[in-house]
Amino acid sequence: MSADDEFRFRPRPGRIRADTPKAGKAKSFLTQAKKIARQHSNAPARSSARPAQRANSSPGAKSGRASGAAKGPGLKRGRGAAFVRARTLSGGWKHSAPGMRRIIVKTRYVQGAGMNGKSAAHLRYIQRDGTSRDGESGQLYSATEDRANGSAFVERGADDRHQFRFIVSPEDGADLSDLTAYTRDLMSQVETDLGTKLDWVAVNHYNTGHPHVHVIVRGKDELGENLVINGDYLANGIRERAGELTTLELGPVTEIEQSRKLSAEIDQDRFTRIDRAMTEEADERFLDLRHEPADPKRQFNRTLRLRRLAKLEKMGLATEHAPGVWELSERMEPALRDLGERGDIIRNMHKALKADGMERDPMTFHIHGAAPETPIVGRVIDKFLTDELGENLTVVVDGIDGRTHHVAGIDAARVADARIGSIIEVGPAETASRPSDRTIAAIAEGGVYRPSRHLEQAKFEGRVPGGDYEGYVDAHVRRLEALRRAGIVERIEADQWRIPEDFESRTAAYDAGRNRQANIRILSAARLEQQIGSDGATWLDRRLISAEASDLAPSGFGQQVREAMDRRREHHIGLGDAALQQNGRIAYRRNLLATLREREVARVGSEIAATKALPFRAATDGETVAGKFTGTVQLSSGKFAIVEQSHEFTLVPWRPVIDRHLGRDVAGVVQGGSVSWQFGRQRGIGL
């Protein structure tokens, strides 16, 4: 073999393959054209058309992401997908481009909002007092109405599978000429991107440093189908459209304006854009700023970082190991975010106190991260949404202990009757065992619960509402299924469950761990000033009779309660309900609370009778009350239910158990200022 033969190129052809699809896989030109058309349309892919898959066909919608890019099949799903693909092909999103105005958009996807009252509650709280520019209630508007009907919007969406909620907050929102017109332009552009008309309402808020708008969108498109929005459009598309509109009105952000905004962040006690940039640039939390760049813009950025690092060093969140070499603390971001949140809370508390004409020392502020361990008694000075996209509330309480308390994450239903100025008690989360758990423990024999035996006993006793014995026992079995997943009980077979000896204590601890919401008790819906001259049995009266004042602080609301009690005492003396004895003590009328309650009920009953075609009759102790439950009325003596008969009506003390029987016939026995409602098998509520 010659040297030329050794280095000569010899091609070795492999197995011959066809350059066409395998048999049976060939696609016609029409099929390929349809596929391309689907990829460039706003409609979901055909593979996601089945109901089981449509329920989750909007990736990212539930998570409410604020940034990031969709990956995988989700890029093609949902309305707005074509807009997302266009941005992907053209080089990415433009809202971070130089000159674009900064926008923050928060998104939430709420399932069944119209079916469980969440939609109505959310609309009610975003229209609360103090959110408009003049400090009044927020005004609901829509695409065509300056005063939209919130009740009609809730009714239209009562059967919707889901609902979308947005908060759009332009950084320069205070400079926009008309936030309402801006929102309408934005939603019109969103409709164009999604290819459908939207049913939406919005409220403008001016109660924060940056004006922002709350937008609620029904989960139906213009054809009545479930509205599925591409997850990446929710995360970035709305933000980009909002940024384009803001930049169009105010013009691009100049370098001088951008520099001024960044310089203002140097001394802020929160996680800023400078901190985020340093976190991204740092290598294993180390930042090297020793070399001064020649570019003036990069020099300015280096100066910003050095000045910010000096601030962080004083806070113990950064360390300079050598000139220009800095180490960022691993707790820098969470610590700064906590500081920013705390600062917002303190500002909100100051604002709520100022609106009520009060001043309090910030050292007396107590921010509760969870339900308080000891009960707090005081007046409500503010209540607002903890998360402005959710339903749970935050309550600010001016306590009788001289402190101002901030308690977050409270179920709105617990404080529905509490208004600004109402007296409430905020206590630890309920840890008592459930009635169902006590029943299971009582039915169990030898540590084994049998649903069949429980069914036999329930039928024998005959106390199940409506006679649905199977459903009653199934509810206990469902409870056991949840406890089984928690490792508390064990399922032996279909009709046998192993119950531990400490079953009730373990279930109570399990519920306490899951339920961290504070327990709320409304002591008086009336303000303190209204109680002084009231003819009913007030919270002040209960304190006067108990003669307990050791829990009242000598300052703040505690001192105001002391003064109100003195004035209430003088009021009783003037009416003859109390007398000053020679030894200086006060003797109150016997059964004072019952007497005051009867007076107020008689007065309010007569006033209601003037508006009804029925006369009022007061119920007596031990009397059986029967009739139709038509509503409630809030008095100084508490909340009362209106029970109507064919020829008269009466007022009886209200209990939560009766609410679900509104408009139905009820019956019970008045006993000691309360009513014993009993559930019967035939009438629903009876004796």
Image (tube, rainbow, N blue to C red):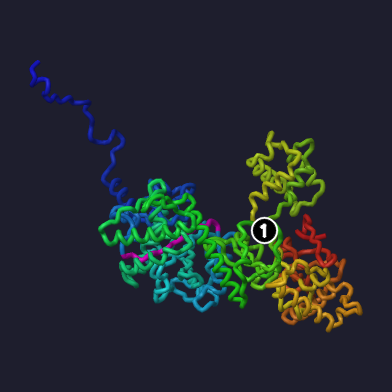
**Position of 46 relative to 532 (above/below):** above
**Residue 40 image position (x, y, % from top left):** 32, 53
Pick out the residue farthest to the front: 323
Hey, which quadrant is residue 292 in on the image?
bottom left
Binning the other alpha carbons within 10 Å of mark 1 as few (below 14), some (14 to 19) or many (20 upward) gives some
Residue at image coords 81%, 81%: 570
**Residue 126 image position (x, y, % from top left):** 54, 68
Q: For this rendering, which residue is in front, 20 or 78?
A: 78
Q: Which residues are magenta?
A: 99-112
Q: Quadrant of the N terminus?
A: top left
Q: For this rendering, which residue is in front, 639 or 644?
A: 639
- Disc 1 is placed on an element classified as loop
Pick out the residue farthest to the right: 582
Hey, which quadrant is residue 381 in on the image?
bottom right
Pick out the residue farthest to the bottom: 574
**Position of 177 relative to 666 (above/below):** below
Pick out the residue farthest to the top: 1
Residue at image coords 68%, 40%: 488
Left or right position of 333 against 352: left
Q: Quadrant of the C terminus?
A: bottom right
Label 1 amino acid?
A: Pro
Residue at image coords 50%, 54%: 334
Q: What residue is disc 1 on?
A: 372
